[in-house]
Image (cartoon, helix red, strand yellow):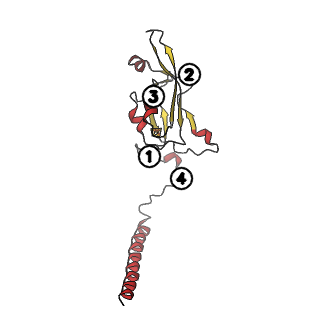
Amino acid sequence: MNAIIKYFSDVAGGFISLLKGMRITGKHFARSYKEIITQQYPDNKDSLRFADRYRAQLYMVHNEQNEMRCDACQTCETVCPNGSIEVIWFREEDPETGKKGKVLDKYVYHLGMCTFCNLCVLACPTEAIKMNHEFETAVYDRSELTKVLNKPGSKVMKDIKDHK
Ligand code: SF4
Ligand code: SF4
Protein backbone atom coordinates (compact mmCIF):
# COMPACT_ATOMS: atom_id res chain seq x y z
CA MET A 1 0.00 0.00 0.00
CA ASN A 2 2.83 2.35 0.98
CA ALA A 3 4.53 1.70 -2.33
CA ILE A 4 1.37 2.71 -4.23
CA ILE A 5 1.06 5.94 -2.22
CA LYS A 6 4.74 6.72 -2.84
CA TYR A 7 4.29 6.03 -6.56
CA PHE A 8 1.38 8.48 -6.90
CA SER A 9 3.11 11.04 -4.70
CA ASP A 10 6.24 10.87 -6.96
CA VAL A 11 4.07 11.28 -10.07
CA ALA A 12 2.32 14.29 -8.52
CA GLY A 13 5.69 15.77 -7.46
CA GLY A 14 7.05 15.33 -10.99
CA PHE A 15 3.98 16.95 -12.49
CA ILE A 16 4.22 19.96 -10.14
CA SER A 17 7.91 20.32 -10.95
CA LEU A 18 7.08 20.23 -14.68
CA LEU A 19 4.46 22.98 -14.23
CA LYS A 20 6.98 25.13 -12.31
CA GLY A 21 9.51 24.78 -15.12
CA MET A 22 6.89 25.60 -17.75
CA ARG A 23 5.80 28.67 -15.78
CA ILE A 24 9.37 30.04 -15.76
CA THR A 25 9.88 29.24 -19.46
CA GLY A 26 6.50 30.81 -20.29
CA LYS A 27 7.41 33.97 -18.35
CA HIS A 28 10.65 34.40 -20.30
CA PHE A 29 8.89 33.58 -23.57
CA ALA A 30 6.22 36.23 -22.95
CA ARG A 31 8.80 38.87 -22.01
CA SER A 32 11.33 38.02 -24.72
CA TYR A 33 10.29 40.90 -26.98
CA LYS A 34 11.43 43.32 -24.24
CA GLU A 35 14.85 41.83 -23.53
CA ILE A 36 16.19 39.99 -26.54
CA ILE A 37 19.62 38.75 -25.57
CA THR A 38 20.34 36.46 -28.52
CA GLN A 39 22.86 38.03 -30.89
CA GLN A 40 22.37 37.53 -34.61
CA TYR A 41 25.88 36.27 -35.40
CA PRO A 42 27.45 36.68 -37.95
CA ASP A 43 25.17 39.54 -39.11
CA ASN A 44 26.24 41.56 -36.07
CA LYS A 45 29.99 41.07 -36.53
CA ASP A 46 30.67 44.81 -36.69
CA SER A 47 28.81 45.54 -33.49
CA LEU A 48 29.91 42.52 -31.44
CA ARG A 49 31.02 43.50 -27.97
CA PHE A 50 33.21 41.49 -25.62
CA ALA A 51 33.96 41.77 -21.93
CA ASP A 52 37.53 42.99 -21.37
CA ARG A 53 38.38 39.76 -19.60
CA TYR A 54 37.35 37.64 -22.60
CA ARG A 55 40.34 35.60 -23.81
CA ALA A 56 40.37 34.37 -27.40
CA GLN A 57 44.03 33.88 -28.30
CA LEU A 58 47.50 34.98 -27.36
CA TYR A 59 49.28 37.74 -29.28
CA MET A 60 52.55 39.60 -28.93
CA VAL A 61 52.48 43.35 -28.46
CA HIS A 62 54.40 45.30 -31.14
CA ASN A 63 54.67 49.06 -31.54
CA GLU A 64 54.63 51.04 -34.79
CA GLN A 65 58.41 50.64 -35.15
CA ASN A 66 57.98 46.85 -35.17
CA GLU A 67 59.48 46.58 -31.69
CA MET A 68 58.26 44.11 -29.06
CA ARG A 69 58.86 43.55 -25.37
CA CYS A 70 59.99 39.93 -25.22
CA ASP A 71 63.51 39.27 -23.97
CA ALA A 72 63.18 35.48 -24.39
CA CYS A 73 63.29 34.83 -20.63
CA GLN A 74 61.08 31.73 -21.14
CA THR A 75 58.97 32.33 -18.03
CA CYS A 76 55.77 31.94 -20.04
CA GLU A 77 57.01 28.70 -21.53
CA THR A 78 57.75 27.38 -18.04
CA VAL A 79 54.41 28.32 -16.50
CA CYS A 80 52.24 27.12 -19.37
CA PRO A 81 50.62 23.94 -18.02
CA ASN A 82 50.32 22.18 -21.36
CA GLY A 83 53.31 23.18 -23.46
CA SER A 84 51.43 25.59 -25.73
CA ILE A 85 54.41 27.95 -25.97
CA GLU A 86 57.89 27.41 -27.38
CA VAL A 87 60.38 30.24 -27.05
CA ILE A 88 63.15 29.71 -29.58
CA TRP A 89 66.14 31.96 -28.98
CA PHE A 90 69.81 32.45 -29.75
CA ARG A 91 72.63 34.16 -27.92
CA GLU A 92 74.03 37.39 -29.34
CA GLU A 93 76.58 39.93 -28.26
CA ASP A 94 75.28 43.43 -27.71
CA PRO A 95 77.51 45.74 -29.84
CA GLU A 96 77.10 48.59 -27.30
CA THR A 97 77.87 46.72 -24.07
CA GLY A 98 79.78 43.71 -25.38
CA LYS A 99 77.57 41.51 -23.16
CA LYS A 100 76.07 38.34 -24.56
CA GLY A 101 72.35 37.87 -24.06
CA LYS A 102 69.35 35.91 -25.24
CA VAL A 103 67.55 37.17 -28.31
CA LEU A 104 64.14 35.93 -29.42
CA ASP A 105 64.16 34.04 -32.68
CA LYS A 106 60.62 32.61 -32.83
CA TYR A 107 57.79 32.79 -30.35
CA VAL A 108 55.72 29.72 -31.22
CA TYR A 109 52.17 29.50 -29.91
CA HIS A 110 50.08 26.34 -30.29
CA LEU A 111 46.57 27.71 -30.24
CA GLY A 112 45.11 24.23 -30.62
CA MET A 113 46.55 23.23 -27.22
CA CYS A 114 45.92 26.47 -25.34
CA THR A 115 43.30 26.41 -22.58
CA PHE A 116 43.25 30.23 -22.29
CA CYS A 117 44.18 30.10 -18.62
CA ASN A 118 46.12 33.39 -18.96
CA LEU A 119 48.98 32.18 -16.73
CA CYS A 120 51.56 33.11 -19.37
CA VAL A 121 50.25 36.67 -19.60
CA LEU A 122 50.26 37.09 -15.82
CA ALA A 123 53.76 35.63 -15.46
CA CYS A 124 55.45 37.67 -18.19
CA PRO A 125 57.71 40.22 -16.46
CA THR A 126 57.71 42.64 -19.38
CA GLU A 127 54.03 42.52 -20.45
CA ALA A 128 55.12 41.29 -23.85
CA ILE A 129 52.07 39.10 -24.48
CA LYS A 130 48.34 39.62 -24.13
CA MET A 131 45.07 37.94 -25.01
CA ASN A 132 42.93 39.36 -27.81
CA HIS A 133 39.27 38.95 -28.77
CA GLU A 134 39.80 37.20 -32.11
CA PHE A 135 37.57 34.23 -31.53
CA GLU A 136 37.08 32.98 -35.12
CA THR A 137 39.86 30.44 -35.07
CA ALA A 138 38.40 27.60 -37.13
CA VAL A 139 40.81 26.27 -39.78
CA TYR A 140 40.79 23.37 -42.27
CA ASP A 141 44.35 22.35 -41.48
CA ARG A 142 45.37 21.84 -37.86
CA SER A 143 48.91 23.05 -38.58
CA GLU A 144 47.48 26.56 -39.03
CA LEU A 145 46.79 26.61 -35.30
CA THR A 146 50.52 26.83 -34.70
CA LYS A 147 51.48 30.48 -34.97
CA VAL A 148 54.64 32.54 -34.71
CA LEU A 149 53.72 35.59 -32.66
CA ASN A 150 56.79 37.80 -33.15
CA LYS A 151 56.49 39.68 -36.44
CA PRO A 152 59.21 39.21 -39.10
CA GLY A 153 62.12 41.58 -38.51
CA SER A 154 60.87 42.74 -35.10
CA LYS A 155 63.40 43.81 -32.45
CA VAL A 156 63.20 44.03 -28.69
CA MET A 157 62.51 47.53 -27.31
CA LYS A 158 65.55 49.34 -25.96
CA ASP A 159 64.18 49.80 -22.44
CA ILE A 160 63.58 46.05 -22.13
CA LYS A 161 67.12 45.32 -23.32
CA ASP A 162 68.58 47.81 -20.86
CA HIS A 163 66.86 46.13 -17.90
CA LYS A 164 68.37 42.69 -18.52
S1 SF4 B 1 46.86 30.85 -21.83
FE1 SF4 B 1 47.51 29.16 -20.50
S2 SF4 B 1 47.46 27.36 -21.82
FE2 SF4 B 1 47.41 29.14 -23.17
S3 SF4 B 1 49.54 29.52 -23.68
FE3 SF4 B 1 49.09 30.78 -21.90
S4 SF4 B 1 49.69 29.53 -20.12
FE4 SF4 B 1 49.54 28.17 -21.90
S1 SF4 C 1 56.73 36.64 -23.53
FE1 SF4 C 1 57.37 37.43 -21.55
S2 SF4 C 1 57.62 35.62 -20.25
FE2 SF4 C 1 57.56 34.91 -22.37
S3 SF4 C 1 59.70 34.78 -22.99
FE3 SF4 C 1 58.94 36.80 -23.62
S4 SF4 C 1 59.45 38.18 -21.89
FE4 SF4 C 1 59.61 36.07 -21.13
**Viewer-side label of 3, 4:** 3
Disc 1 from disc 4: Cα separation: 13 Å
| Labels 2 and 3 touching (C-beta < 8 A) | no
Q: Residue at x 44, y 33 (%)?
A: 78
Q: Which mark is residue 74?
A: 3
Label located before the other in sequence (3 or 4):
4
| Mark 3 vs ligand 2: CB below 8 Å | yes
Disc 1 from disc 3: Cα separation: 30 Å
Disc 2 from disc 1: Cα separation: 32 Å
Give the residue type that dot 3 points to.
Gln
Where the N terminus falls, by quadrant? bottom left
* Label 4, residues with CA under 10 Å away: few <14, some 14-19, many ≥20: few
For the residue pair 47 and 15, the one nearer the viewer reads as 15
- Name the side, left or right, on which 58 lies relative to 9: right
Label 1, secondary structure: give it: loop
Disc 3 from disc 4: Cα separation: 38 Å
Disc 2 from disc 3: Cα separation: 20 Å
Q: Is residue 112 above or below residue 12?
A: above
Q: Residue at x 39, y 85 (%)?
A: 8
